[in-house]
Structures are given as structure tokens and as C-alpha cells.
Image (cartoon, grey):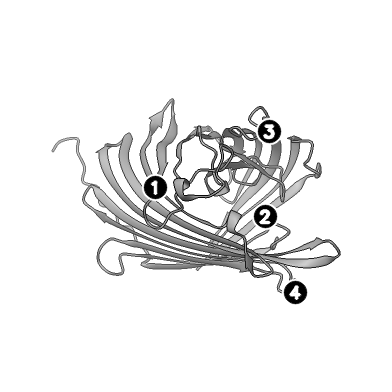
Amino acid sequence: KNEYSDIYIKRDNKPIGFGINYNDLGQFETSRHRIRYFLNTHNIFGLNESLDFSYQQKLQRQYKERDAKNFSFSLNIPFKYWSLSYSYDSSEYLRTINALGRKYKATGNTETQTFGLRKMLHRNEDHKIDIGARISLKDSKNYIDDIRLISSSRKLSALTIDSSYTGRVFSGLLSANGSVSFGLKRFGANKDHEEPFRDEYTPKAQFRKYNVNISWYRPIHKFYYKIFIGGQYSKDILYSQEKIGIGDDTSVRGFKDESTQGDKGFYIRNEIGYKGSQILEPYIAYDYGRVFNNKVNENKVETLQGVAVGVRGYFKGFEGSFSIAKPIDKPTYFRNNKPVVYTTLTYRF
């Protein structure tokens, strides 16, 4: 046709990718410095599937009294407007507690399996909408000197229904996801009505909670602004695995080894950066978050605020980030008021 052109795009997708990552984002009690190995494959079975493997362990082997390990695996298979997914995550920890004149060994492990199904509802050059459902099975076990702690060891299963939107809004890219989760009685989960000594302050395995995540990215000449809002609401008292937590590099920056969580709450991350260089991306950030609990200290609101300055770098197969963050508002029981450092370095082969 007149005024039309045929455009051919040739893209070389590597069927197998491997990488290694260093980070100092771990907890001091289990291991601050960590190393992670990851493997990604695409379409090696001819199903257009994606396979991802990851294993993370501590880097400081000389510290025998603390440890943390994590293994994760995920599979995604698309079919027309549908996609099937499965993921498995296993984490272990070891830390030492000094109390009453002796040392106690605290250990634990958590296994999580997630089965998911998604469908694309609408897609064009500007917008994309999809809907999905997933079932998550969580099994947590905790021990003191190899004696299992019944109160903090549990099995939970949950059904989550969610919808996502991605599109161009106000000259920027908007991504939004809203979900509702229901605690189930099936798949070996703890049942609230079978628990002895239960009262109104006991966390619920059969819960309901709502989550929302919204991000917006806006380029402005050689600069950019991005904001991320994460929130959760529930009328139930939740187990720790289901609460919303703030106070780390992924929520409110400025905190390490000290965080807080609640049955409901939110956090907002703001960032302004410079993208005029292909290698370095400096930025400044301000984060704010609040959490609340139901019935247990329900009138107590905990607020965190932090500021950060950092730089991200990209060079051939390397990518990394370094930032210094400082708390500017925190609960009175938080001890640290000094700046903290977040470091990551990744190499992809």
C-alpha cells in the first residue's frame, strides 16, 4: 500500500541465560552478604515456555552460627490468550540466640508452591488488561534447639484473584494490580475451628485480604520520575506471612535489620533520576509507609520514612546499584538512626 512499509525485526533470543549476583541485603542475624546464582531458559522444549532457577546462600562461610539459604523455581507456559504457571520456593535460616547465660540455636524452613492461571482480556498498542487466579500453599516450620515451635509452625493455603493493567497514562507508563485473597481450609491447611485455646486475638488461617500495587514511570527529557504505591487491607488478624511489611530496600528505604509489619497498611516510593548516560543512572528517593494491626495494639500506628541517594550502573554483562539511605521517621523502639548501604552487583553470561 502507498505510504505503508513492511518492517522486519530480527531478534536473537538466547535459549539459556546464566548469571551470578552479589548483594548485602541480608539480615545480620542470618547473613548480611549473599551470593545468588540464577539460570533462565526460553523455549527449549518448543512450547514457548520460560523456566527460571535461582539459588542463594551466604557469602561469609566463617560465621558458623548464622546462615540463610533460598532456592526458587518457576515455570510459565503461554497458550494463545492464556498462560499457566507454577513456582516453588524453599528458604532456610539459622541464627543463634544468647539468653539466660547460654546459646540457643534457632532454625526454620518455609516451602511455598503456587499454581497460577491467567488470561489476556484486552491488548493493543497502548493498553493491556489481564485477569488471573492462583493457589498458594505455604508450609512453615520453626525450631529452637531442634524442638519444633507449634505456635509459629503452620500450613496455610490461599486463593488469590487479581487483575492487572498496563498502559500509557499522562505521558507515562502506568502499571496497576488489584487482588483479593482468601485463606482456604483445603490442601492440608490449618483450620481455625480446630485450633484449641483460640480467642479473638489469635491470627486466622481462613482470612480475607485485599492488595493493590500501582506504579507510574514518566520520562522528562533526560530525567525521569517514578512512583510506586503498595497497600493492603484486612479486617482479620493475619499470620506474619500474610502481613504487609515495611522497612527494607523494596519498601521504605533507610532500614536494615529493623522493620515492622501489620494487617493493613501502605507505602509510597518516590524516585527522581537521570538517564542521560548509557552507563550510569544517579537518583534520589523519598519513601513513606504506615502499618496498622487489628485488635492487637489496633490504636497504634507505626510510621517509617526514609531518604536515599544512589546510582545504578550498566556495562556490557554487568549491572549493579549502590545507594546510601537514612531513616527520618521511625518507631521509638528502632535502635539505628545511622545511614545504611544497599549494594547489588550482577553479571550475566
> Which residue is outermost to the top?
170
Image position of 50 (left or right of 191) = left
Q: Position of residue 44 (x, y in %)?
A: 31, 69
Residue at horizontal 65 percent and vertical 37 percent from the top: 285
Which circle's residue, 2 or 1, is located before the other in the chain?
1
**Amino acid at pointer 4:** Gln
Residue at horizontal 59 percent and vertical 65 percent from the top: 92
Badge 2 vs badge 4, beta-carbon distance below 8 Å: no
**Amino acid at pointer 1:** Leu
Query: Which residue is at the front of the view, 176 or 21?
Result: 176
Q: Secondary structure at mark 4?
A: loop
Quarter-of-image position of residue 265 = top right
In the rendered structure, find residue 184 and report the number of the disc placed on it: 1
Quadrant of the snapshot with the N terminus: top left
Residue at the spot of label 3: 302
Query: Which residue is at the front of the view, 43 or 78?
Result: 78
Residue at the spot of label 4: 62
Which circle's residue, 3 or 1, is located before the other in the chain?
1
Q: How many marks?
A: 4
C-alpha separation, residue under disc 1 versus residue under disc 4: 43 Å
Residue at the spot of label 2: 343
Q: Position of residue 228 (x, y in %)?
A: 53, 35
In the rendered structure, find residue 207 and report the number of the disc placed on it: none
Image position of 284 (left or right of 127) = right
Q: Secondary structure at mark 3?
A: strand
Q: Nearer the viewer, mark 3 or mark 4?
A: 3
Badge 3 vs badge 1, beta-carbon distance below 8 Å: no
